[in-house]
Image (tube, helix red, strand yellow):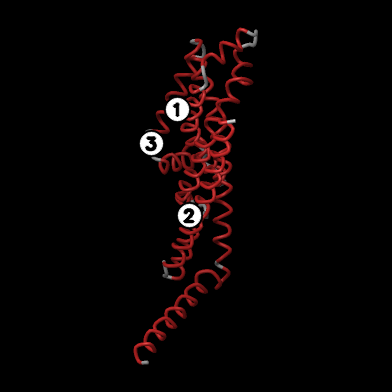
Amino acid sequence: MGILGGIAGFFTALLSYGIRQFTRTFIEQKRYLLFIEGLRNTLFISAAAALIGVVIGVLVATVKVYYRQTGRFRLLDRLFAAYVALIRGTPMAVQLLIMAYIVIPSNNYVMIACIAFGLNSGAYVSEVIRAGIGAVDSGQMEAALSLGLPRSIAMRRVILPQAVKNILPALCNEFIAIIKETSIVGLIAIVDLTRASDIVRSRTAEAYFPLLSIALVYFLLVAGLARLTGLLEKRLARGDRS
């Protein structure tokens, strides 16, 4: 009984400690509101950045493909090549700080983060889209041109719809990457999930619940999106077989 009583006492004390720390982390002073605000900012910045990234990616990839095929838009091709090289060659944290304190000196840090992450995502999405366009059989463009379609319309109505099927899973993975990368937006005083945990940790002097709770939230978000990506890939694979 002595050993069993000791074990029971240990787990009782552990449970009591866990409840006390949970209360300090989330309940006292309504600190859970910080985590809700952080989650909202994380999701908003991620979604906005993904949308901006897709728009930029489509534009950059289209210009680069046009240049390879026709030799037109040489200047734009060079500018976009420099943009992609610059984005891929510098850390996201540095890009965020430059955008916040040099390029866009504004107090609307959420907007700045959306633009910064959108520009970063656009460079990578452009390469994904360019690869997707390259995977479409070249005979598709030739057939469209032989039917009298202008190259721009052929690209928009024939090539891009087929390329989308190839790149959708990769775009979903890019969105997952953006969600994880937004954990650095606290560098410019935005309360995201990570920053919320830092604030609570500084007020309670406890790291266990603040850090493990946001790790769990990030994991659930990424796991959910990964699951959706897997279902999408299976659906596209069934479409190919049919």
Q: Residue furthest front?
A: 242
Gap between marks 1 and 2 measured at Cα: 32 Å
Residue at (49%, 14%) from the top-left corner?
A: 67
Task: Return the mark for residue 197.
Answer: none
Q: Which of marks 1 and 2 is nearer the N terminus?
A: 1
Q: What element carries label 2?
A: helix
Q: Name the residue under label 3.
A: 90
- Judge from the rendering whether residue 96 lies leftward or rightward of residue 2; answer left or right: right
Report the residue marked by disc 1: 83
Query: Measured along the vertical axis of the image, is residue 16 above or below residue 195?
Result: below
Q: Which of marks 3 and 2 is nearer the N terminus?
A: 3
As drawn, the residue found furthest toward the left would be 3
Instruction: Quote the CA–CA distance across marks 3 and 1.
Output: 11 Å
Question: What residue do we see at 53% from left, 38% from top?
Answer: 233
> How many residues crowd mark 1 within 10 Å: few (<14), some (14–19), many (20+)?
some
* Label 3 vs 1, first from the N-terminus: 1
Q: Are marks 3 and 2 in contact (CB under 8 Å)?
A: no
Q: Is mark 1 on a helix, strand or loop?
A: helix
* Residue 21, percent from left and from top: 47, 74
Amino acid type, label 3: Thr
Out of 141 and 27, give the one closest to the viewer.
141
Please tell me how crowded label 2 is: few (under 14), some (14-19), or many (20+) other residues with Cα within 10 Å.
few
Q: Against 13, is 111 above or below?
A: above
Question: Residue 22, position in %: x, y?
Answer: 50, 72
- The answer to which of 219 and 84 lies nearer the viewer is 219
User: Which residue is at a point 58% across and 69% down the rendered structure image?
Assistant: 30
Which residue: 50% across, 12% down?
69
The three-letter code of the residue at mark 2 reads Phe
Separation of residues labelled 3 and 2 (CA atoms)? 26 Å
Kind of residue at disc 1: Tyr
Residue position marked by numbered label 2 in the rendering: 219
Q: Nearer the viewer, mark 1 or mark 2?
A: 2
